[in-house]
Amino acid sequence: MISKPINRNGTKCPLFRKRVDKVCHTCELYQHVSGKHPQTGDAMDQWGCSLNLIIFLSIENTAVAQRSVATMDALRREVQQASDVALVDTLGRLNDRIDDARANGQTKLIGSSPAGGN
């Protein structure tokens, strides 16, 4: 188990109403966090109260959600474009088949085989 450092910033714990140097290192909410600061991008490697760190984590969560939405929107546009191309291609082939059938004098267009058989 990692030994928790004593917090010496001189403030009082909002939960226990005692000086942080007396309670933080014994509290389960006092946790180590490392990574990038969500607003500045600077490296973060610190111990802090989970209640205070929730703000940073919620900012990071929001940023990840926004990136996910942007990615999904780009994917939706790509799928829509591919679907539009496929639809135009299918309709073009269907129109060509109808034109060929009419040119060959076929009256039954639906259910006829592409080789011209009935």
Image (cartoon, grey):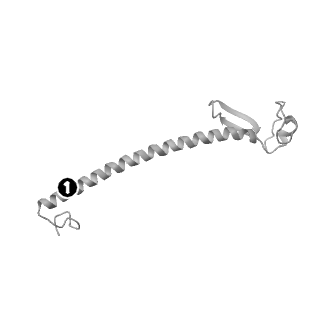
Quarter of the image with the N terminus is top right
How far across and how far down the image is residue 11, in percent? 83, 32
Which one is nearer the viewer's eye here, 10 or 102?
102
Taking the image as shown, residue 8 lies to the left or right of residue 36, namely: right
| Residue 109 picture quarter | bottom left
How far across and how far down the image is residue 75, in percent? 44, 46
Residue that appears at 44% across and 47% down? 76
| Residue 25 picture quarter | top right
From the image, tell me which residue sits under label 1: 96
Q: Residue furthest bottom?
A: 118
Quarter of the image with the C terminus is bottom left
How far across and how far down the image is residue 19, in percent? 87, 35
Q: Is residue 2 above or below residue 118?
A: above
Q: Is residue 70 above or below residue 87?
A: above
Taking the image as shown, residue 115 lies to the left or right of residue 79, namely: left
Taking the image as shown, residue 64 lies to the left or right of residue 116, namely: right
Q: Amino acid at mark 1?
A: Asp
Taking the image as shown, residue 76 lies to the left or right of residue 63, namely: left
How far across and how far down the image is residue 100, in percent? 15, 58
